[in-house]
Image (cartoon, rainbow, N blue to C red):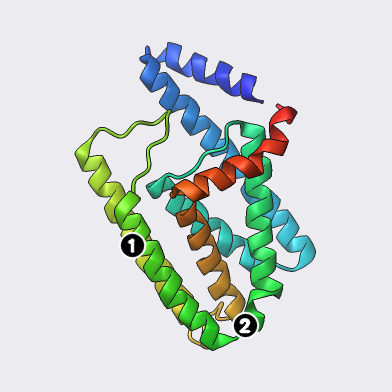
Amino acid sequence: MEQFLDHLADTIAEQFHYTEEQHAVVRYGLVALLQTTVIFLLLVLLGLCFGFFPQALAVFFSVVLLRKQEGGAHASSLTGCLILTGIVLTTLAVLSRYIFPLAGSWAALVLTVVLGTACVLISWKLVPVESPNKPLRDPKKIARLRRNTFVLLAIYLLLAALALPEGILPFSSLSITFSILSGTVWQTFTLTKPGRRLVNAMEAPFRRLN
C-alpha cells in the first residue's frame, strides 16, 4: 500500500511540477486520507456489530478533527498507524460505552472540567506540533491552527457537558460525554513527549509487519 501511495504521489508531483517539499506534503495528505478512511470504516463496522456505534463516531471525530489542527505523535509506518489507531480508538469507544459511565454523572462533570482544563493548557503550550513531512513556517497558518484548536476544544467540552443531563441534546448520555472527553484527552496526550514515547512503544510490535 505504501508503494502505491508513493507512486501516486510521484505521479501527482510530476504532473504539477512540484518541488520535493511539495511532493512530501502530497504524500502526507494521501496517507492521512487513507488512514482516516480506513479507521472510520473500521469503527463504523465494529460499532454497528457490537453496539457502540454512537460512541465510536464521537471518539473518531473528537480525535480526527482536533488532530488536523494540532498535529501530534506519528507512527513510523502506515501499517503501524492503522493498527495502533484502530486499537486505541476502538478501545476508547468500548470503554466509553460500557465502563466509564459506571463512574456516574458527578465524576463525569468533574473530569470534564479538570481534564478539559488540562487539554486547553497543554494545547496552549504546544500547538501546533509539526510533522516531519509537513513543516510549519507560515505565521498566519500557525495562528489559524491555534485558533481552530481552541474553537474545537470549546465545542467539544461544551458538548461533553451538555450531554450529561438527559434530554438537552438528542444524543444525551454519559457514554457520549466520556467518548468526547476520552478522544480529546488522547489526542492532546499525543502532543506531549510522554505521549510520543507511548505511541512509539505501542507501535513497536507492528513494525515487522511492514
Q: Is residue 171 above or below residue 209?
A: below
Circle number at residue 210: none
- Image quadrant in which you'd find residue 205: top right
Q: Residues within 10 Å of mark 2 (few under 14, many from 20)?
A: few
Circle number at residue 103: 2
- Image quadrant in which you'd find residue 124: bottom left
Q: Which residue lies at the image location 61% right of the left edge and 31% below the top edge?
A: 77
Question: Label 2's element?
Answer: helix
The type of residue carrying mark 2 is: Ala
Q: Position of residue 17 (x, y in %)?
A: 37, 12
Q: Residues within 10 Å of mark 1 (few under 14, many from 20)?
A: few
Q: Which residue is mark 1?
A: 121
Question: Label 1's element?
Answer: helix
Q: Earlier in the sequence, mark 2 or mark 1?
A: 2
Marks counted in the figure total 2
Q: Which residue lies at the image location 62% right of the left edge and 47% below the top edge?
A: 85
Please state, as top left, top right, bottom left or bottom right, where the N terminus lies in the image: top right
Q: Which residue lies at the image location 57% right of the left edge and 32% below the top edge?
A: 76
Please state, as top left, top right, bottom left or bottom right, where the C terminus lies in the image: top right
Decide if residue 138 is on the left or right side of residue 184: left
Q: Position of residue 171 (x, y in %)?
A: 56, 77
Q: Position of residue 91 (x, y in %)?
A: 68, 59
The type of residue carrying mark 1 is: Leu
